[in-house]
Image: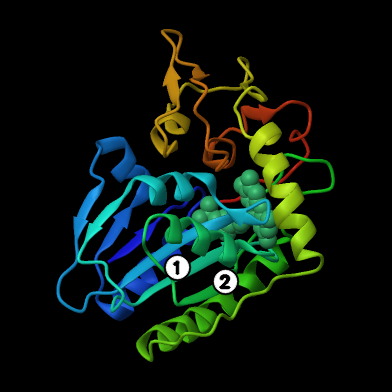
């Protein structure tokens, strides 16, 4: 069983590749939260995989919210559990943080791997999507990286293989809490009325059902944003902006 969360498709791609290679069932964390299906049962010997993006050098908060609520019958000390996190560059202490979340719920995670994928973070000055060249190099490298992940899972590896990057403690223990406290939220998102084509795709792709379309057909954010950026990246006419930070930034989805 693989639980996954993805905003712009990178982690979904990785999760689907793993599920296909390992013959695992795939469960979307956001879909599960939205439908209230938070109770699962493992078959004999079934493994549990957790796949999600790294946000600000920690696990995407919606994945953490899922781990705090899900119950999995049959998850015991014998269960092989692994996490795979996608990132643009590095994950700092995301693996330790994920383990701490699971331990609180009586679960564990024997192995963690990171997979570098095209970057989708564009909200702060200095952050933009990758160049087309880097994007395609990352995508090609991901194919062999995913094969390594599959091999590690098949041999029930218990060693982590992650890119922590520089100053991991500072990033995960200082920046991540600040991100969760001050940078999560949809107050900065707006749709430019003269550009929006009222297609409603932003509402459809929002994994947290946080966007409702107004009577005039424009998106209204509802205050439960998980910061995945799928709305801003998927808008086909670039009507969605975040403050004045994103007019000149690229857009990306897998
Ligand atoms: C809010 C936010 C924070 C991010 N923080 C990091 C980070 O700390 N390190 C990193 O390498 N990439 C970071 N990224 C980039 C994503 O982790 C990366 O593009 C990921 O593959 C996106 O996955 P998805 O397409 O499944 O949503 C961040 C992206 C977002 C939206």
Q: Which mark is residue 14?
A: 1
Front position in the image: 98 or 56: 98
115 relative to 94, above or below:
below
Asked if the residue at label 2 sits under 8 Å from ligand 1, the reply is yes
For the view shown, which residue lies furthest in the right direction? 126
235 to the left or right of 214: right
Report x, y in % for residue 75: 26, 67
Q: Which mark is residue 240?
A: none
**Can residue 128 be seen from the camera position used here?**
no
Asked if the residue at label 1 sits under 8 Å from ligand 1, the reply is yes
Secondary structure at numbered mark 1? helix
**Can residue 152 be seen from the camera position used here?**
yes
Q: Are marks 1 and 2 in contact (CB under 8 Å)?
A: yes
246 to the left or right of 72: right
Question: Whereabouts is ligand 1, in terms of quadrant?
Answer: bottom right
List the residue tagged with mark 2: 115
Q: Along the polypeptide, which appears first: circle 1 or circle 2?
A: 1
Identified at 79% across, 57% down, the residue is 170
């Amino acid at each position: 069983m693989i639980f996954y969360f993805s905003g712009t498709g990178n982690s979904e791609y990785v999760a689907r590749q793993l599920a296909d290679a390992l013959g695992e069932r795939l469960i979307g964390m956001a879909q599960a939260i939205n439908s209230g299906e938070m109770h699962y049962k493992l078959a004999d010997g079934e493994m549990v995989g957790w796949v999600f993006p790294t946000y600000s050098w920690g696990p995407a908060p919606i994945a953490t919210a899922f781990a705090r609520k899900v119950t999995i019958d049959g998850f015991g000390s014998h269960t092989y559990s692994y996490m795979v996190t996608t990132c643009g560059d590095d994950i700092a202490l995301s693996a330790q943080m994920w383990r701490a979340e699971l331990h609180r719920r009586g679960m564990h995670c024997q192995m963690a791997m990171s997979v570098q994928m095209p970057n989708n973070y564009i909200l702060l000055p200095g952050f933009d999507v990758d160049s087309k060249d880097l994007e395609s190099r990352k995508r090609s490298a991901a194919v062999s990286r995913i094969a390594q992940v599959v091999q590690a899972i098949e041999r029930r590896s218990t060693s982590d293989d992650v890119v922590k990057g520089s100053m991991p403690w500072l990033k995960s223990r200082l920046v991540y809490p600040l991100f969760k406290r001050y940078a999560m939220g949809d107050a900065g998102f707006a749709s430019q009325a003269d550009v929006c084509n009222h297609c409603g795709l932003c509402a459809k792709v929002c994994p947290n059902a946080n966007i409702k379309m107004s009577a005039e057909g424009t998106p209204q954010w509802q205050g439960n944003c998980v910061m995945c950026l799928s709305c801003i990246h998927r808008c086909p006419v670039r009507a969605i902006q975040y403050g004045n930070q994103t007019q000149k930034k690229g857009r990306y989805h897998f």
